Image: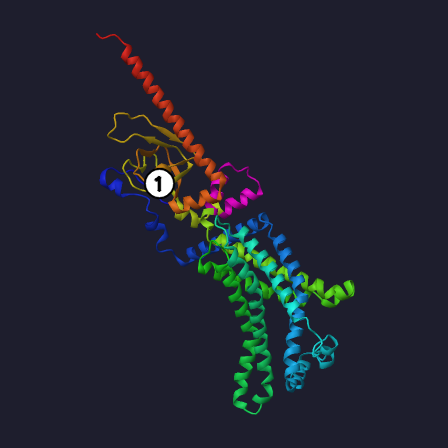
Amino acid sequence: MLSVTHRSGRDERAHRYDLDRNPVNDHHPLSTKLEGGLNWFLQAGYSTAFLFLKNQLSSHASGVAYYFLLAVGPLVLVVISILNTSLVNYPELTKDLFALLEKFSEQLNEEFFRSIGVLETQVALSGLSLLGLLWTSRLIVSAVQSAFGVIFPSPRARNPLWSNLLSLVLLPVILTLLGLSAASNVAIRFLRDEVEHYPWLENFYDLLLSLSGSMAPLLLIFSLIFLCYRFLPLERPRTWHAALGAGLCTLAILGLKIAFIHFVSLATYNYVYGSLGAVLFLLLWVYLLFLVFYLCAQFVEVAGRIDAIALDRIIALQDGAGGVGERLEHWLFGRSRRIVSRYVRRIPAGGWVYRAGDAGPEIFYLQRGVVDIIPPSDSVETAPIATILPGQFFGEMAYLSNEPRLADARAREETELLIIPPSMFEALLAQSPDASRRIIESMSRRLRQCTNLLARAARNTGTAGSEPTR
């Protein structure tokens, strides 16, 4: 916290609350930086969970899971059609391919694929199944865009042509990339017999197999999620916020996969639901996958405005009822050293907040104490124009009118202020109806005080003019 002493003349005018040169933010010890980072993460995590529930993103995840279920049928038919075309036209590859597949599972043999229609030239569903896949992919991407419209609100509208084109091609491109990743791993495994003839290549082969089987899919998933977070929202987040969210999402998906392997049994689903067990298992997996995806997307959005959220909660806590939620928010936001060092200032009794003629664009919110708005020092009038009480904004007229300060602001007693820079003030107005209402109330109260002051001055002038001349 900064303590501001009473100054006069040029020294006093030079002493202003320059947020970019705040000495509290310079030369932090490592422990303070770690504490600030942890506090930032806790604030972002709490706000993410709150907004995730408020925006009902679980319903959006349910919609995507349903559309994905519709896409399974056309996707299987497309795969069958591709296998038909490739294996029938190149029969010499059939024997080697099925020998490779049987190494992964004995059920993946030629007889199995013939039983489901693969290698049968009579199958002619490729065109219809491709249209079905494109249609369901459009539904899925449209659902994701709709969810992103809730997570990343924007006054702009999407270009319908670009939106429809993206919805038609995005899912097939993603499936193609995933297929290529799997195919590369299969191809590397296929080279095992060849590598055995060259012992010096075995170590390199083992490393390549490990990377292709674990790291390559994770990097691909991270890249796809990062591109979605960075470029799908109309109000695009910062690159490092998108990268952080994509990294958290990738790790969460990996953890979800491990949990599924250890705690969820497909055999149990098949036993309970019969032939529908695999479908319900897949539906549950996709639903949880998109829950994680939307949760991390909300984190990306929150990370870009966490200071505005923190200031909004601090202002809202001014009138809090003191419940469990308010106490938790007070601990997370109200007592945050990171927020205090950036935005909170203390002024002793008689200290100046600003002087008439100052060009500072900051807006002030009074948390504790009393501030008098008084005429400039060269004015005949000395009585306060207005009195600012806790819970009120002031100083916003200089920013809104883009003009210097018109009056002096002086602390009547020890005072604690939030000093809000213009960009943060705009973000606060955009996201918080409560802050907007408080600003309107503060301006109305000051206008009423000025009106009453002018009325008293007019009455005093009239009374003085009516006295007889002696």
Q: Which of 90 and 75 is in front in this view?
A: 90
Q: Quadrant of the C terminus?
A: top left
Q: Quadrant of residue 469?
A: top left
User: Does the stretch in magenta take in 205?
Assistant: no
Q: Which colour scheme is used?
A: rainbow
Count of residue discs:
1
Q: In which quarter of the image is residue 180?
A: bottom right
The residue at the point 46 percent across, 48 percent down is 336
Q: Position of residue 71 (x, y in %)?
A: 65, 64
Q: Is residue 51 left or right of residue 359?
A: right
The residue at the point 27 percent across, 13 percent down is 465
Q: Position of residue 153 (x, y in %)?
A: 51, 50
Residue 66 seen by the camera: yes
Q: In which quarter of the image is the N terminus?
A: top left
Q: How crowded is mark 1: few (under 14 residues within 10 Å), some or many (20 or more)?
A: some
Please report the bounds of the magenta region as a residue range.
Answer: 309-332
Q: Is residue 379 left or right of residue 307?
A: left
**332 above or below 124?**
above
Q: Position of residue 382 (x, y in %)?
A: 29, 26
Q: Nearer the viewer, residue 216 or 176?
A: 176
Residue tagged 1: 399
Q: In this view, does 444 lie to the left or right of 401?
A: right
The residue at the point 27 percent across, 38 percent down is 7
Residue 421 seen by the camera: no
Q: Is residue 138 left or right of residue 422?
A: right
User: Does the stretch in magenta take in 324?
Assistant: yes
